[in-house]
Image (cartoon, rainbow, N blue to C red):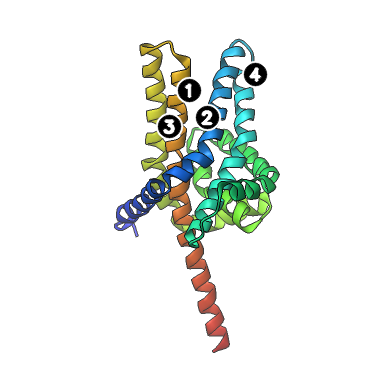
Amino acid sequence: MSSNLPVKALQIINDGFRFFRDHFYQLATLCLPFLFATTLFDFVLARSLRESPMALFAPMMVNLLIYPVYTAALIHLMARRAKGERPTNGALLAAAMQQWAPLFLLKTVLVALIGLGISLLIIPGIWLGVRLAFAEFYLVLFGQRPVDAMRVSFIRTRPHFFLILTLLATTYVPIVLAGIGSDQLLQGLTNNDFFRVLVSTAWSFVGLLVNIVMFRLFMEVVASDDGLRSADALQGEG
């Protein structure tokens, strides 16, 4: 498995990039308005509350409130495109709004757990981030409760721990570092805050590639689980 891990990771990333490229327009029209709103509110709140203890908490709450909408819509888009369907943005957002509350709760718990883990020498936070990588998919697509989605994610990610870690290290980490670096560079080059918001929004949009790559692996794991169940059923009938 270890010798094939880089090849497998590259294949999944290539598939994810291909989806991102082929569905760029719908991804942009579906997610960019929410990403722009989140980035703008983050920037305004961070500026206005600079001297307040709420300077970190308020932007985080805005993120948590908006995140479930475009994330659930993105997950539904990927799942339905995998079935060969062509859903409209309106249908995707309508489906996403129905799952806003449970996904908001799940995301809040994930942020708290991973944040606590990172505060404990970083490694526990990374471990939790990997083991909970599928939780949102199970909640949105299978209608599971947040606690059940987390439990199943823990089980299903165990055999794929190092593959998920590799995928996150080669997508999430570079994108985050590039976003932070570009913002630091812009602060030294221009006083145009709106341009900084636009650039940060663009990097957030590129960050959707991480969700797409994780979903690509998730679908493979689910297909493998279905295949094993089918084989067990056939053996039982025999």
Element class at badge 4: helix
Mark-to-mark CA distance, 2 and 4: 21 Å
Residue placed at 39% from the left, 34% from the top? 175
Instruction: Check the image and report above or below for 237 versus 89.
Output: below
Mark-to-mark CA distance, 4 and 1: 20 Å
4 or 3: mark nearer the eye = 3
**Comes first in the chain, label 1 or label 2:** 2
Q: Image quadrant of residue 33?
A: top right
Residue placed at 37% from the left, 29% from the top? 178
Element class at badge 2: helix
Instruction: Give whichever of 143, 108 is nearer the camera.
Output: 143
Residues at marks 1 and 2 touching, judged by CB atoms closer than 8 Å: yes
Where residue 41 sits: x, y (%)? 58, 23
- Name the mark on residue 63: none
**Comes first in the chain, label 4 or label 3:** 4
Instruction: Check the image and report above or below for 94 versus 56.
Output: below
